[in-house]
Image: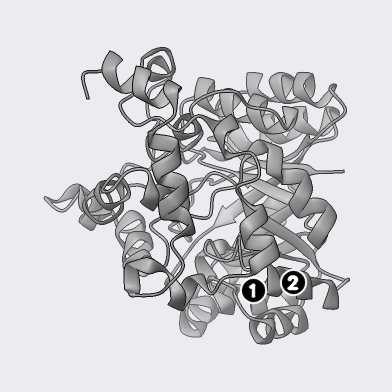
Amino acid sequence: MVRYCVGTSFKNLSLIEEADRYNQRGKGIIKEFYGSVENQIFASISFGSGVEHAEWEDVVKFTKKATKYDIDVYLNVNNLKATPDFIEKNQTQILNFLKKAEDIGVKGVIFAAVPLIEFTAKQKTSLKIAVSAILQVDTLQKIKRYRDMGVHRIILSLFKGRDFNFLEKLKMFPELEWEILCNEICRFECPFLPQHYLHRSNFDFAQDKTKNYYYKFCYKELLEDFPVNILKTRFIRPEDVPFYHEKFGIQYFKIVRRESHPKLISYFMDAYTSFDYDGNLMHLFPMFMKNPEKLKEPSRFYIRNKDLEGFLDYFYVNRPDCYNDCFTVGGSCDYCKKVAERLSQSEKFVITAKAVGA
């Protein structure tokens, strides 16, 4: 059974009933919600304002209700500064945090700092430990090290979604659970990815004049030469989720982001749990979808999702070396470019472009 992990602020309890309604279809199910909680020890990825961080009271209410629907809750602890010295200095507070999470029924924690993984794995706790995508796990050597530390799940690197040679080897670790991101996109092999995370987790950076940093180096570049740069990102269409589950044994699929408007989160859940989406692919990417009202408006940037049926076949059959042989670095593979040209000539694309005056 395909299981989805959905981001939330923990402040909208109605998402639980909506998840249950989608789960009744008997296809992909919403198995988990994840998010952050305000505390004095851990600074998580905050997107500058911290508005998506819940109070403990919010998490308690959300977890209690989710449990009634057989839905688990995970807490993100995306602290990038948890050094061994930090842990030693704050050991009591960290243990209290873990104990409180366990007591209210939280299923597990998602860590982006290796010292926190090591520390928590040594404690007598029922909390499961997942490795954050921030750590960019992309080799078997890294997987082995994390497994030996005591983790139970690894959220794979953002850029490994079409490296099928790598994904096939995950079966070498049957004791681990795997999770992959569906609708988080960043320019393929983006050299600024570490800075994205640093910027978004630092309140001072996010509040100063560089607040558009993330957009300058990703949002803008992704829309250049549209839609080829979008096609090169590692998105997973709702229709392709079963392929990843059946071929590679990936159990969990992550739907981002937790700071999105509740109506957008519901929209994403609806599309992915149905395994069928006849709409603008761009509407599934939170980077480009901030306001649910935009779902009703024609968009200049349009990719009909159904026009990408079979898009993954080329990657699975031919196993191209995207890291080195892409046409953008002088290589011979121009598959994404050719698909982009075909999409831009489609009737729906032309009609939409005229409607918005493109």
Q: Is residue 246 left or right of residue 192?
A: right
Q: Residues within 10 Å of mark 2 (few under 14, many from 20)?
A: many
Q: Quadrant of the N terminus?
A: top right
Q: Which residue is mark 2?
A: 151
Q: Which mark is residue 86?
A: none
**Where residue 227 appears, x then y in whole percent?**
37, 43
> Dot 1 lies on which element?
helix
Please tell me whether residue 228 is drawn above or below residue 271 in the rendered image.
below
Q: Can residue 271 be seen in the rendering of this structure?
A: yes
Q: What's the residue at 46%, 67% (across, down)?
A: 333
> Dot 2 lies on which element?
loop
Q: Which residue is mark 1?
A: 117
Q: What's the residue at 63%, 70% (across, down)?
A: 319
- Among the 4 quarters of the image, the one containing residue 133: bottom right
Q: Quadrant of the C terminus?
A: top left
Q: Residues within 10 Å of mark 1 (few under 14, many from 20)?
A: many
Q: Amino acid at mark 2?
A: Val
Q: Can residue 130 be seen in the rendering of this structure?
A: no
How many tags in the picture? Answer: 2
Q: CA distance from mark 2 to mark 1?
A: 7 Å
**Where residue 139 appears, x then y in whole percent?**
63, 80
Q: Mark 2 or mark 1: which is in front?
A: 2
Q: What's the residue at 78%, 67% (across, down)?
A: 152
Q: Amino acid at mark 1?
A: Ile
Asked whether the beta carbons under mark 2 and mark 1 sit within 8 Å of each other, the answer is yes
Q: Is residue 261 left or right of residue 329?
A: right
Task: Looking at this view, name the residue that lies furthest to the left.
Answer: 209
Q: Earlier in the sequence, mark 2 or mark 1?
A: 1
